[in-house]
Amino acid sequence: MAANGSNVVSRGAVRFTEEQEALVLKSWAIMKNDSAHIGHRFFLKIFEVAPSARQLFSFLRNSDVPLEKNPKLKIHAMAVFVMTCEAAAQLRKTGRVTVRDTTIKRLGSTHFKNGVSDAHFEVAKFALLETIKEAVPASMWSPAMKGAWGEAYDHLVAAIKQGMKPAAA
Amino acid sequence: MAANGSNVVSRGAVRFTEEQEALVLKSWAIMKNDSAHIGHRFFLKIFEVAPSARQLFSFLRNSDVPLEKNPKLKIHAMAVFVMTCEAAAQLRKTGRVTVRDTTIKRLGSTHFKNGVSDAHFEVAKFALLETIKEAVPASMWSPAMKGAWGEAYDHLVAAIKQGMKPAAA
């Protein structure tokens, strides 16, 4: 399926096997209906590992509401989690990271503007994998499933980082 | 506030309660004889969360030896772990972060030179607490123990960061 004007293509074709796709789809099917809750835990884990990452979010910087109760964080966390999982779920079918063009551009510029570092992307990856591990049945989790989600995440970050580069023109 | 020749003082007196000291001493007594192994796990956890942190260590950058088997990493990890725990164990008695002057100066300049960021210090804190949690009996671990080690670590990092500032004179 060709990337048209509304998709963003990460550099080169994405290698994502049928087995990896199956592992992502199987776990995403279980998590999907609980996205709000799991997404929230994903972000709380990020801030547990790297509390300074809170400074990257305007709605956390300027708020007295405790992190756990911040309604804007809950909404944001769910949106990011669903976007991440949907991109992973479509990765093999499309052969590329598929998110709406406007979104990846905005993501790129926002992450760039806020000075998000490689370490932050790594902490988010760790938090995502830990969160998924805790969200699926213990018997379902495996090194292969961890690898599949990890690779899918890496492709998403590569696409965001492309969007973080200053425009060539 | 006088730092004498052999000690480094973090800004202001360190508040560390008798209960916190007891929690640190109790767990350190259990871990001490296994410092090499636990220190190694501490560093492997850091690199699990933030693989890019490997670039901060010359003996990892220039080595083909797998991370888990690198003998220099094992030695370094044990030294850092023991220093961290000893500083925590002495925190209340001395009222300050006690490490040898030469060491903290070297630590400060090395961390500064290598561009260690707040996020890296946070990842190391998370890794330390996770490692201690897994190293002590489950019945011993508690939020209070986590808090005691976390505070002790924060004081150590504050001392290192003081050493990271360009010399005033």
Image (cartoon, coloured by chain):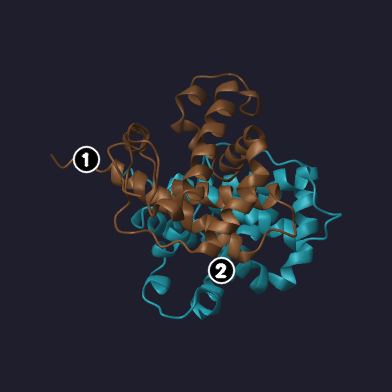
Chain colours: A brown, B cyan
Q: Residues within 10 Å of mark 1 (few under 14, many from 20)?
A: few
Please tell me which residue is depicted at 57% across the width and 54% down the height of the picture.
A24
Discs 2 and 1 lie in a common subunit? no
Q: Chain of mark 2?
A: B
Please tell me which residue is depicted at 70% across the width and 55% down the height of the picture.
B89
Q: Chain of mark 1?
A: A
* Viewer-nearest of discs 2 and 1: 1
Residue B58: x and y in percent read 38, 70
Which amino acid is tagged 1? Answer: Pro
State whether residue A149 is above or below residue A38. below
Which amino acid is tagged 2? Answer: Ala
Q: Secondary structure at mark 1?
A: loop
Residue placed most toward the observer, A136 or A125: A136
Residue A80: x and y in percent read 50, 36
Please tell me which residue is depicted at 33% across the width and 46% down the height of the picture.
A161
Q: Residues within 10 Å of mark 2 (few under 14, many from 20)?
A: many
Q: What residue does disc 1 label? A: A166
Residue placed most toward the observer, A145 or B86: A145
Q: In the image, A1: left or right of A135?
A: left
Residue A92: x and y in percent read 45, 56
Q: What residue does disc 2 label? A: B77
Residue A118 visible, this orientation: no
Q: On the rendered image, what quadrant is the C terminus of chain A found in?
A: top left
Q: Secondary structure at mark 2?
A: helix
Q: In the image, B147: left or right of A15?
A: right
Residue A24 visible, this orientation: yes
Q: Disc 2 vs disc 1: Cβ atoms closer than 8 Å?
A: no
State whether residue A161 is above or below residue B67. above
Q: In the image, B51: left or right of B97?
A: left
Residue placed most toward the observer, B13 or A11: A11
Residue placed most toward the observer, B149 or A69: A69
Residue A45: x and y in percent read 61, 42
